[in-house]
Amino acid sequence: MIATEKFPYTDFPFRLEYKEEKTNKICWFECEEHLQKHLDRYKLKKKDITVENRDAKPVRSRKTDKGSVEQKPKSKGKRSPSAIQKRKSSMDTIGNTSGNTRKKK
């Protein structure tokens, strides 16, 4: 078991430590996915970080697929007519206004 000074929060078993400019940053994470998201967001390299798990389980590193979330695949060719939707006007037509709803006798 690792010392409780390194893991002061019971719900955050993952600890990340790295140097940013002149200060040491320490972050705790609830799950491995949140840790990985932080590593991806700040583009931290494996050689610059120290990752520890309170339960002493090894932390697996995953290779990121650039653009897997950010970029959508470009469609080739034209859209089919069924995929194109016409915009409906929110305004009533002249003959169908709320003032002309009474029927003529």
Image: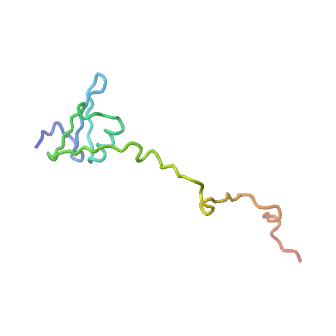
Q: Residue furthest left?
A: 1
Q: Is residue 75 above or below residue 22?
A: below
Q: Nearer the viewer, residue 18 or 66?
A: 66
Q: Which residue is nearer to you in this view: 15 or 100? A: 15
Residue at 24%, 45% (x, y): give it.
12
* Residue at screen point 12% across, 39% down: 3
Residue 42 image offset from top left, x and y in percent: 35, 35
Q: Quadrant of the N terminus?
A: top left
Q: How many numbered marks, from 0 up?
A: 0
Give the side of residue 93 with respect to residue 39, left or right. right
Residue pictured at 31% horizontal, 23% vertical: 21
Q: Is residue 16 above or below residue 77?
A: above
Of the pair 71 and 24, the residue shown nearer to us: 71
Residue most extreme to the top: 22
- Left or right? Give the position of 78 relative to 38: right
Q: Using the rendered view, name the quadrant where residue 16 is placed.
A: top left
Residue 61 placement (x, y as % from top left):
25, 43
The percent position of residue 96, horizontal first and vertical second, equals 79, 65
Q: How is the image coloured?
A: rainbow
Q: Residue at x 28, y 24 (%)?
A: 23
The answer to which of 9 and 72 lies nearer the viewer is 72
> In x, y percent, where is residue 41?
36, 38
Residue furthest out toward the front: 77
Looking at the picture, does residue 53 appear above or below residue 17?
A: below
Quadrant in which residue 105 is drawn: bottom right
Residue pushed farthest bottom? 105
